[in-house]
Amino acid sequence: MEPTKNLTELARELWREMAEMRNSLRQYVHVKIKENNWDISMELVEILGLVYRRKGLNQQEIADIIVKDKSSMTYLIDNLVRKGLVERTEDQRDRRNKLISITEKGRLLMEELNPWVTEIYEKATRELMTDDVLKALSVARKMNDNLKQL
């Protein structure tokens, strides 16, 4: 019988499982992109999906949510702008700030992408209860908060 794992060992295992889950999601998205001949990367899909779901985000807010540095985010958003999927608009409250908004072309692409993005999350949560996911989310957030205090 395996001895009980201590909290540190369990945390390492949790981190590895989360990394594996993210890699699985990325691979699935990459395959779907290739199958459909879409000219977009996983990183761009991630940003586009966020802008599609949440209005009025600026570049820094997007970077914070998807955990990218400012220079990477500028490059990625520039690509989305070039593809006509998003646009930068002036924030009426602070003219130095640019809001990232989805275009009609971006919205149409997201409507194509959404069914299979939803499908992968449904597969991932099969046989789970809402409370299971809420608890996992709470634990991950607490661990992230602890690390931000380092």
Image: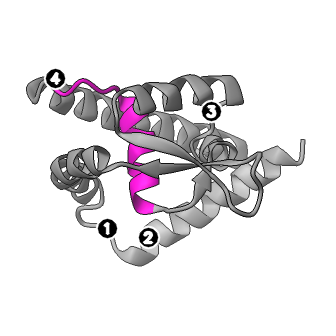
Q: Amino acid at mark 3?
A: Lys
Q: In what element is the residue under mark 3?
A: loop
Residue 23 visible at all: no
Q: What's the mark number on residue 132?
A: 2
Q: In what element is the residue under mark 1?
A: loop
Q: Earlier in the sequence, mark 4 or mark 2?
A: 4
Depicted 54 relative to depicted 97: above or below: below
Q: Earlier in the sequence, mark 2 or mark 3?
A: 3
Q: Amino acid at mark 1?
A: Leu
Q: In what element is the residue under mark 4?
A: helix
Decide: marks 1, 2 in contact (CB < 8 A)?
Answer: yes
Q: Residue at x 70, y 49 (%)?
A: 7
In front: label 3 or label 1: 3
Q: Earlier in the sequence, mark 1 or mark 4?
A: 4
Q: What's the mark number on residue 128?
A: 1
Q: Quadrant of the C terminus?
A: top right
In front: label 1 or label 4: 4
Q: Residue at x 81, y 52 (%)?
A: 146
Q: Earlier in the sequence, mark 3 or mark 1?
A: 3
Q: Is residue 131 left or right of residue 59?
A: left
Decide: marks 4, 3 in contact (CB < 8 A)?
Answer: no
Q: Is residue 139 left or right of residue 23?
A: right
Q: What's the mark number on residue 34?
A: 4
Q: Which residues are magenta?
A: 38-53
What residue is pinned by disc 3?
68
Q: Residue at x 35, y 48 (%)?
A: 103
Q: Amino acid at mark 2?
A: Asp
Q: In what element is the residue under mark 2?
A: helix
